[in-house]
Amino acid sequence: MDLDAVRTFVAVADAGRFQDAAAELSVTQQAVSKRVAALEKALGVRLFTRTARGAELTIDGQAFLPHAHELLRAEERAVASVRPGRRALRVDVIGRRLGPADVLRDFHRAHPETELDVVTLPDVDTAVEAIRSGAIDASFRAVTMPGRRLPDDIGAVRAFDEAIQLLTGPSHPLATARAVTPADIAGHRIWMPGLVPGSESTAYYDALAAAFGLTIEITGPDFGAEPLLDAIADSRSLATFVADRVRLVWPADHGLRRIALRDPEPVYRHSLLWHRDNPHPALPALRAHLRSGRFDHSDAETWTPAWAH
């Protein structure tokens, strides 16, 4: 349906005169008459009766008027849903229990007036394509993995560094330690069945293992976080790595230990990606929040792969 014709119909109904509606819409009276005539033809009914006083709604016109108002309100909502600054900022966080989601929650607490739409996409290639198509506004990714080159229209900035911890069960030889060095865990079994070959996180942990002589096993099916935690809790030899902002919940009798890594502290570097032509006004606020220093690990001796610099 021609919404200009609907808008003209509403203007005539409100004004009661074709001439007054034309002045309100800044068009000629002839244009108003043509639009109303086209709408009447499309509907198959007469909407107005011309009188000496102007234009009066017919019974069909009276029946159509509230629906015409609703059509115009729907148009306003549709436009507002995609107008920068009026719609929610859509951000990809990889997973809702992972560090980027925690950082985005921190941003929302600091900027409660900013409406957010949080999504989770499977990999960096999907995220970049979604940014370029306009499906999302930004994504948290580790985009400096070997061989990774972003398209020229995609902006990227260091978002935050996330410390890596060792997770063990209560019977593990390192369970009572408050902190260990990466060298201390050489020779211990590190099990991470969720690592996917070719992914951002796998590239990071491959580099970590090579740098400190570690063995990371990815064998066995990945049944998710809860079965992994069950296995770690019951084992005297298995441990796994977990980022410090990852939200994990386990039964009290599991007795799991999150142990800090020091000297150096391995950190996983996240970047924020966005399209350079994206005008959404909340994007600068998000980038400024990430630059605020609240996620800085510069006071510690840290390690990250050379390609992440």
Image (spheres, grey):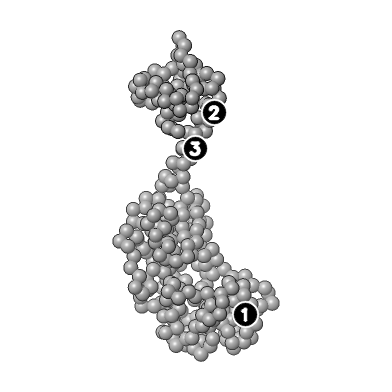
Mark 3 closeness class: few <14, some 14–19, many ≥20 residues within 10 Å? few
Query: What amino acid is labelled 1 in the image?
Result: Ala
> Tag 1 or tag 2, which sits nearer the N-term?
2
Q: What is the three-letter code of the residue carrying label 3?
A: Ala
In the rendering, which numbered label is found on residue 74?
A: 3
Circle 1 is placed at which residue position? 231
- Amino acid carrying label 2: it is Pro
Q: Which residue is mark 2?
A: 66
Give the alpha-carbon distance from disc 3 to disc 1, as whole Å.
53 Å
Quick check: 168 above or below 45? below
Question: Dot 1 lies on which element?
Answer: helix
Q: Position of residue 252 (x, y in %)?
A: 68, 74
In the displayed structure, does residue 213 sit left or right of residue 254? Answer: left
Looking at the rendered structure, the secondary structure element under dot 2 is helix
* Residue lying furthest right: 253
Residue at image coords 64%, 72%: 250
Residue 20 visible in the displayed image:
no
How far apart marks 2 and 1 lie (CA) works out to: 63 Å
For image coordinates 48% across by 81% down, the residue present is: 262
